[in-house]
Structures are given as C-alpha cells and as structure tokens.
Image (spheres, rainbow, N blue to C red):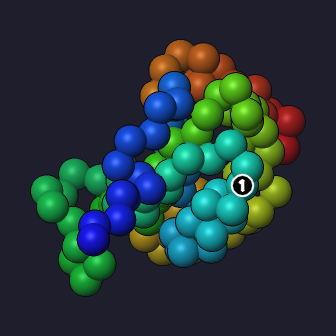
Amino acid sequence: MTLPNALHHVDVPTKKATFAMACFWAPDALFGATPGVIKTRVGYCGGAKNNPTYRDLGDHTEAIDVDYDPNQITYEKLLELFWANHDPTARLKTQYTSFIFYHDEDQKAAAEKTMKEQ
C-alpha cells in the first residue's frame, strides 16, 4: 500500500520570502512552525560561486526560502519575525550575514520600511 505524499499537491496560492539570519537551522524551525507558512527550504544565497556547498560556500550566506499563504500571513508579519529573532548588527563571518532577499518591488518597499524602523 502506498500512502499519498502530503506535500505532493498543495492547492494554495503561495508567495515566497527569502531571508538570511545567521545559521539557517533556527530560522528554519521558526518559520516552519509559523501558521500560514507552507514550506521552508534552507541553502545558500547572494554569492558568486557556482554550486556552493557547506564546506565550500564561497561568499554566499546561509539563507531560508519561505513559501507562505498570503491569505493566512503577510509578508510584513514575516519581516517582524525576521527582525525579532536575530541580531542583524552582529559582526559575523559572511556565511552568517543578515540579508533580506526580495522577490518583487512590494517586498523591497516593505523590507526598506521595516529596516528604517529598527
């Protein structure tokens, strides 16, 4: 007997947010447990190296992609979680630098607005 895969088909309109906030495991747990978040993925972002790996990531930073249902949670609420759950001023190596990678002009405007409020 084959059981259906729960992630095989999600019939929900989703949007994507991408954040870097130090090591990616804590943000993965945070966003993964947030109502309205459909799926998270961790990886590397922002660098020039092709095919970065954990042992050789070049100038990339650890990041998390968050697929979310905008009818259940807003991008602004995700930004609140971003700012409240790490120290963006910490002087860490490039691998753990704080970033907001926006996917459209609305996300860019929201990110810039919340950054000014910090």
Query: Viewed as shown, does residue 47 lie left or right of 116?
Result: left
On the image, the x and y values in percent for residue 108 come to: 58, 25
Disc 1 element: loop
Q: Which of 95 and 73 is in front in this view?
A: 73
- Relative to 98, is 62 above or below? below
The amino acid on which the numbered mark 1 sits, given as a three-letter code, is Thr
Residue furthest front in the image? 1
Q: Residues within 10 Å of mark 1 (few under 14, many from 20)?
A: few
Q: Looking at the image, how many numbered discs can be counted on the residues?
A: 1
Residue furthest top in the image? 105
Residue on which the image places disc 1: 34
Residue furthest bottom in the image? 55
> Which quarter of the image is occupied by the C terminus?
top right
Which residue is depicted at the point 57% across and 66% down? 28
Query: Viewed as shown, does residue 21 lie left or right of 101?
Result: right
On the image, the x and y values in percent for residue 31 come to: 65, 57
On the image, the x and y values in percent for residue 96 come to: 51, 69
Residue furthest right in the image? 117
Q: Which of 16 and 53 is in front in this view?
A: 16
Q: Which of 85 and 68 is in front in this view?
A: 68
- Relative to 86, is 117 above or below? above
- Mark yes or no: residue 51 visible: yes
> Residue 21 occupies which quadrant of the picture?
bottom right
Which residue is depicted at the point 61% across and 34% down? 69
Which residue is depicted at the point 42% across and 63% down? 42
- Relative to 67, is 81 above or below? below
> Residue 113 occupies which quadrant of the picture?
top right
> Which quarter of the image is occupied by the N terminus?
bottom left
Q: Which of 86 and 59 is in front in this view?
A: 86
